[in-house]
Image (cartoon, helix red, strand yellow):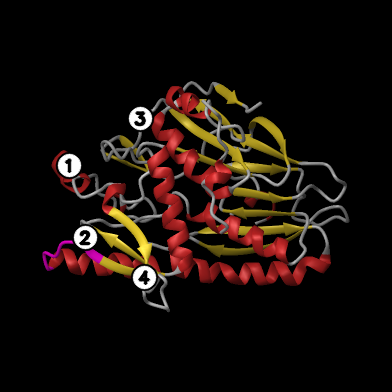
């Protein structure tokens, strides 16, 4: 069988050292006191996390400032929880339809939302549902980002999962000139969540914007989703380190070099809570509605697109190493690093 690359699926589309030492960390990017060879660093807070863009030439500062200003725009499209965002309004409309007992619901969507949802559904398909953008109701119950944690019962999970599934979402063109696409949802009890891919998708968009403004060397860090543009100013590739998957760890298990690529880590140690002596992490298995039990602590995926790396790191964590390794045999431009519950590191590097 001919091996594929993820480019066929990709549509054009927390400060200082501490920020760059999150899930997959950029090595050698300087400390808080800038030296001549260190990058300039712009930071902000968006998507409920600290974000940064590091760049090496001060002539790029205006382009970087413009890119940072765009973060609020993207949050107002893709945030499930931000009232007034496009995704929040889509889910609100679905909730109203469900309360009225309606069937199919057609919702106009922006071009950017269309592209992101298309990508999410593509990957839901090729990962056989290991990535699922329709688990929002479960995530609302667990409330991993808040304090009102609820562990749904088996009956609640079964009821919610009966209303989930990529097959219930369909994208198509619309006659509305303001919103040229529409989303048809056959089960309005669905709550859409793009948290497993939005930061990667946005990082790809920011890269395109920076490239269009002649930025040739930079690091985009959206809460640990790392995307590097080009090489370092001296022509050498960037170094990325995979951290030991423990909260607050600064120890690296391995490192590698990248040019124009993204590294994204998904792990059970990143967001979790404990209740009645049980730990619940935020990566849910769409088959059970429970936190995935795949024998893994973290998965780091490295590929050209940050959206692809984001989506696949989540899907691989759910699949487990064996299924993910079999999946990777069909793709030529994806590397993956798996850390299991015994802290063993296994690498799958494309030839």
Residue 232 placement (x, y as % from top left): 81, 48
Magenta span covers which residues?
100-105
Residue 105 placement (x, y as % from top left): 23, 65
Labels 4 and 3 touching (C-beta < 8 A): no
Q: Is residue 233 left or right of residue 14?
A: right
Q: Which residue is mark 2?
A: 188
> Which numbered disc, 4 or 2, marks the residue that appears first in the sequence?
4
Q: Which residue is mark 4?
A: 174
Q: Which residue is mark 3?
A: 293
**113 over 22 or under it: above or below:** below
Mark in front: 4 vs 1: 4
Labels 1 and 3 touching (C-beta < 8 A): no
Label annotation for residue 158:
1
CA distance for labels 1 and 3: 18 Å
Give 14 or 56, whichever is nearer the viewer. Answer: 56
CA distance for labels 4 and 1: 34 Å
């Amino acid at each position: 069988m001919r091996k594929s690359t993820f480019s066929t699926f990709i549509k054009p589309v927390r400060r200082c050292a501490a920020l760059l030492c999150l899930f997959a960390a950029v090595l050698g990017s300087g400390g808080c006191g800038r030296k001549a060879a260190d990058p300039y660093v712009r930071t902000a807070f968006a998507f409920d996390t600290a974000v940064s863009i590091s760049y090496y030439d001060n002539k790029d500062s205006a382009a970087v400032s413009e890119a940072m200003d765009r973060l609020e725009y993207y949050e107002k499209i893709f945030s499930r929880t931000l009232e007034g965002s496009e995704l929040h309004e889509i889910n609100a409309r679905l909730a109203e339809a469900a309360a009225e007992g309606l069937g199919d619901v057609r919702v106009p969507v922006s071009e950017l939302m269309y592209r992101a949802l298309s990508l999410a559904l593509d990957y839901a398909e090729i990962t056989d549902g290991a990535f699922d953008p329709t688990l929002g109701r479960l995530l609302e119950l667990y409330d991993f980002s808040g304090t009102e944690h609820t562990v749904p019962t088996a009956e609640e999970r079964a009821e919610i999962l009966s209303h989930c599934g990529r097959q219930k979402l369909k994208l198509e063109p619309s006659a509305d000139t303001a919103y040229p696409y529409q989303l048809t949802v056959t089960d309005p009890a669905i709550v859409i969540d793009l948290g497993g891919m939005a930061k990667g998708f946005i990082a790809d968009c920011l890269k395109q914007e920076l490239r269009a403004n002649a930025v040739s060397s930079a690091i985009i860090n959206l809460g640990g989703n790392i995307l590097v543009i080009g090489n370092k100013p001296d022509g050498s590739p960037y170094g990325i380190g995979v951290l030991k998957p423990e909260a607050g760890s600064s120890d690296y298990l391995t490192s590698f070099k990248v040019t124009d690529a993204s590294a994204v880590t998904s792990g059970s140690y990143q967001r979790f809570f404990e209740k009645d002596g049980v730990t619940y992490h935020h990566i849910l298995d769409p088959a059970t509605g429970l936190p995935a039990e795949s024998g893994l602590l973290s998965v780091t995926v490295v590929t050209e697109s940050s959206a692809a790396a984001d989506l696949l790191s989540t899907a691989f964590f759910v699949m487990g190493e064996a299924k993910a390794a079999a999946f990777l045999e069909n793709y030529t431009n994806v590397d993956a690093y798996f850390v299991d519950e015994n802290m063993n590191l296994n690498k799958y590097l494309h030839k």
